[in-house]
Image: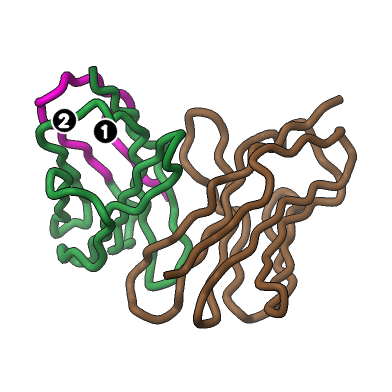
């Protein structure tokens, strides 16, 4: 079974631009979560989608948004990028509530 | 709000020595607990999970963890460290109520294994 796939692996953007990251979950997993990882703040929860609906949301500004498609693939978007948005963005899928999360290798975003 | 505390941001052991990584949680209800490992430039890989079935949980790569409710702890151990165990380890908690799959992670412990 293929794991969680995130594209692209690396991105370089400039301040003020917007970016879209993509995540394909493990086949059969309907829950997709997004996390931001930085050296200063560690792993922080962004949001979770289940069956195309946002089920949970973390404490991030509205510039961070996401969506999930009918095939469970998910995208997250960050608008008006700031330097502080530089981070590793991790996507994870799971089979059900409180089931383990299976993570992709992440997208490393650098904002200059 | 639930939280996780990992004592020691860096732990160094000799190859063959016992590995002990500490995790304490704060939760108002019996939690689901997880340990993940992260190698450089990779995502997180699940080592083991506690879901109240048994207090001693065995995971992959020879790791195990014991849930102690009285101490609100879920420490990770491995009897004999190997060079390949060098990585960053994260403890995480998820409450069984409220729905969803939101995990709260600790700040991580970087494990170094020396010859």
| Vertical arrangement, residue B5 with respect to residue B101, above or below | above
Residue shown at the point (86%, 33%) measured from the top left: B14
Q: Chain of mark 2?
A: A
For the C terminus of chain B, give its image quadrant: top right
Hue of chain B? brown
- The part of the chain drawn in magenta is A1-23
Residue shown at the point (48%, 34%) measured from the top left: B42
Q: Position of residue B102 (x, y in %)?
A: 37, 63
Q: Read off the residue under disc 1.
A: A85
| Vertical arrangement, residue A5 with respect to residue A65, above or below | above
Whether residue B7 sits left or right of residue A92 in the image: it is right
Magenta highlight on residue A22: yes
Q: Nearer the viewer, residue B60 or A46?
A: A46
Mark 1 lies on a secondary structure that is helix
Chain drawn in green: A
| Vertical arrangement, residue B72 with respect to residue B21, above or below | below
Instruction: Have a look at marks 2 and 1 and say if they share a chain.
Output: yes
Q: Nearer the viewer, residue A80 or A67?
A: A80
Q: Position of residue B5 (x, y in %)?
A: 59, 57
Q: Are marks 2 and 1 in contact (CB under 8 Å)?
A: yes
For the N terminus of chain B, give its image quadrant: bottom left
Splitting the image into 4 quarters, where does residue B57 fall?
bottom right
Q: Nearer the viewer, residue A92 or B114?
A: B114
- Give the alpha-carbon distance from disc 2 to disc 1, as whole Å: 7 Å
**Which of the numbered marks, if any, corresponds to residue A57?**
none
The number of callouts visible is 2
Q: Read off the residue under disc 2.
A: A81
Magenta highlight on residue A36: no
Splitting the image into 4 quarters, where does residue B13 fall?
top right
């Amino acid at each position: 079974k293929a794991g969680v796939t995130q594209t692209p692996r690396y991105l370089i953007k400039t301040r003020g631009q917007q970016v879209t990251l993509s995540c394909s979950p493990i086949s059969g997993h309907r829950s997709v979560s997004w996390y931001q990882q930085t050296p200063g703040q560690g792993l922080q929860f962004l949001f979770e989608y289940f069956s195309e609906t946002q089920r949970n949301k973390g404490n991030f500004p509205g510039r961070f948004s996401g969506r999930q498609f009918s095939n469970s693939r998910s995208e997250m978007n960050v608008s008006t990028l700031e330097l502080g948005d530089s981070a590793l963005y991790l996507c994870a899928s799971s089979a059900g509530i409180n089931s383990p999360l299976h993570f992709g290798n992440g997208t490393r975003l650098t904002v200059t | 709000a639930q939280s996780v505390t990992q004592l020691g941001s860096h732990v160094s052991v000799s190859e063959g020595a016992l590995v002990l990584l500490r995790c304490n949680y704060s939760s108002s209800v019996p939690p689901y607990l997880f340990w993940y490992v992260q190698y450089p430039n990779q995502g997180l890989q699940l080592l083991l999970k506690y879901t109240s079935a048994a207090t001693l949980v065995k995971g992959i790569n020879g790791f195990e963890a014991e849930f102690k409710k009285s101490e609100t702890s879920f420490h990770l151990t491995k009897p004999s460290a190997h060079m390949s165990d060098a990585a960053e380890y994260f403890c995480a908690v998820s409450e069984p109520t409220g729905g969803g799959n939101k995990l709260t992670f600790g700040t991580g412990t970087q494990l170094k294994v020396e010859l």
